[in-house]
Image (spheres, rainbow, N blue to C red):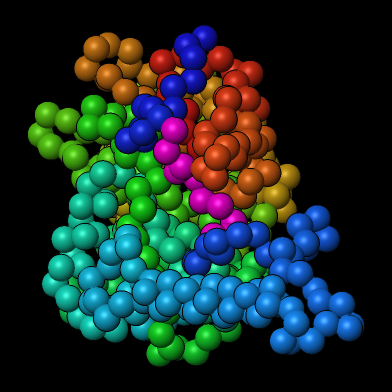
Amino acid sequence: MKPHTPSLCCRGSLRAVARPRYASIAASPSPPPSASNPSPIPTPSPKSSPGSNPRRWLGIIFVGVSAAAAGAYIRSQSSDSATLNPDTFTKYSLVSREPVSATSSLFTLRPRKPSGDNYDVYEEAWRVGVWSVMFKQPQLQIGRDYTPLPTTAATSLSVDDENEGCLRFFIRKDPFGEVSRYLHSIDVGADVELRGPKIECAIPSETDDILFIAGGTGIAPALQAGYSLLSRTNSERRPRIHILWANRLKDDCAGGQSDSAKPQPRGWFSGWFGSSKTLESKKQDAVAVMEDKHTSLIVRELEALKSQYPGQVTVDYYLDEENTFIGKKDIMNSIQSTPTDSSRKSKLILVSGPEGFISYMAGPKLWAQGQELQGPLKGVIRELDLKEWGVWKL
């Protein structure tokens, strides 16, 4: 098997591309006091007096200066800029929060100060590949990265909303997630501070085939990858993406119908063109699903992508409630009979979802020197020995 090459879709081979659960907005100059790391500030004895213990006053002064410096740093992270940028937080307004299921919602945010420059920022990020922005939880001064959804034919955004720089996010309410609980608790119209974009995975220009294995809200990066890849379509090139999407709840993927209900050994690439249905017929089916009010919002997004790029997108759904899971056979059926000629220079398997899902499929990511790295390829994909396919964990 070829060695796992992290540099395949990342600008730097050791760049942190996976999102940590939380990130501190303002890093402290030293670790906070704890049982294993006691405070360095000396505690005076009961007999000491302010005038007889200068070290106490030096400690108080040090704490005051440190607090002031931390406060100044936090304030510096917020700016009056109307344009999203990776250095400071920009204020957005929560336009809407539409429930997708009992545990997740679709968020739409608009910059508090409209700026035409945001369109250029977004377009550059879409062109490169998969990207995210950090949401700030202001009370705890922590942040969490979330992946914006691309604008498709299924989006509810108007032309004016799009021009004003609206962004949409598929976010699950985690009972233990400080940022997600905060976002689900605020009122429509409230300010939300964002920082970014952060490129999670740059999709090489020569990439023509992507297999995306998604768990839960990991479908958001899959939609991004599809949008970025398929936008490179022209008269001589038709890149393709196949998505395997696993969910716990049926509501998350209501209305979704797998394109490979009975996968054939020859694989999904040949299956697209060997189907008895014409591309026009498939496009009509996608429109019908989008118009069904019982269809999940995310399924509508996927069907819109199919409609926009007929014959270049396939999706298979897996549901815990129905005891259907992504296994080795599903992955193998998804890559067999893939063209191997020199015109297909780069083929990628991208994995996104909860930490446990990623670890099971491709092995865990690792932390080293303050960065989250890819780590060695393990799990189901490693056991399959998939030659000619690069693997990337999001």
From the viewer's perspective, is residue 181 above or below residue 227? Answer: below
Q: Position of residue 188 (x, y in %)?
A: 45, 88
Provide the residue span drawn in magenta: 14-23
From the viewer's perspective, is residue 352 above or below residue 4? Answer: below
Q: Which residue reaches farthest front?
A: 52
Q: Position of residue 103 (x, y in %)?
A: 63, 69
Q: Which residue reaches farthest left?
A: 235
Verify whether residue 345 appears in magenta: no
Q: Nearer the viewer, residue 182 or 239?
A: 182
Q: How many marks?
A: 0
Q: Is any atom of residue 86 visible in this view?
A: yes
Quarter of the image for residue 90 reads bottom left
From the viewer's perspective, is residue 243 above or below residue 221? Answer: above
Horizontal side of 377 relative to 131 (left or right) equals right
Q: Nearer the viewer, residue 273 or 177?
A: 177
Quarter of the image for residue 276 reads top left
Residue depicted at x 54% and y 22%: 332
Residue depicted at x 43% and y 88%: 190
| Predominant SS of the magenta segment | loop
Q: Which residue reaches farthest right?
A: 46
Residue depicted at x 75% and y 82%: 52
Q: Is any atom of residue 154 visible in this view?
A: no
Q: Position of residue 342 (x, y in %)?
A: 24, 12
Quarter of the image for residue 268 reads top left
Q: Position of residue 311 (x, y in %)?
A: 29, 38
Residue depicted at x 46% and y 60%: 146
